[in-house]
């Protein structure tokens, strides 16, 4: 019995089933030298600033905050 089969029958069944369904994608993610970490980081930073600014100003204040943060 493989590790994925055992995972599919344990407390992490949802995770094991997801990995089993997307084995090619998981393999590509592990082996690929490319990463979208920089993009995800910028999106996270933008969302944080947006949440902090919610209700405080319009787009010009948000732009000033982002330009100042860079």
Image (cartoon, rainbow, N blue to C red):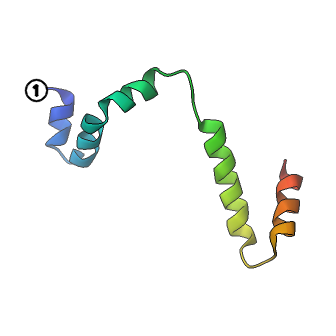
Q: Nearer the viewer, residue 33 or 7?
A: 33
Q: Residue at x 69, y 47 (%)?
A: 42
**Residue 68 screen position, x and y as percent:** 89, 54
Quadrant position of residue 39: top right
Q: Residue at x 84, y 52 (%)?
A: 69
Q: Residue at x 65, y 50 (%)?
A: 43
Residue most toward the bottom? 55
Q: Nearer the viewer, residue 52 or 59?
A: 59
For label 1, the residue is 1
**Residue 25 screen position, x and y as percent:** 38, 31
Question: Callout 1: 10 Å neighbours few (<14), some, many (20+)?
Answer: few
Q: Quadrant of the N terminus?
A: top left
**As drawn, 22 above or below 10:** above
Q: Is residue 10 left or right of residue 58?
A: left
**As drawn, 43 above or below 34:** below
Q: Nearer the viewer, residue 35 or 13?
A: 35
**As drawn, 70 above or below 64:** above
């Amino acid at each position: 019995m493989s590790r994925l089969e055992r995972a599919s029958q344990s407390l992490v069944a949802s995770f094991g089933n997801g990995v089993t369904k997307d084995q090619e994608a998981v393999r590509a993610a592990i082996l690929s030298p490319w990463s979208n970490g920089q993009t995800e980081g910028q999106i996270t930073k933008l969302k944080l600033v947006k949440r902090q600014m919610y209700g405080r100003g319009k787009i010009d204040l948000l732009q000033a905050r982002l330009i100042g943060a860079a």
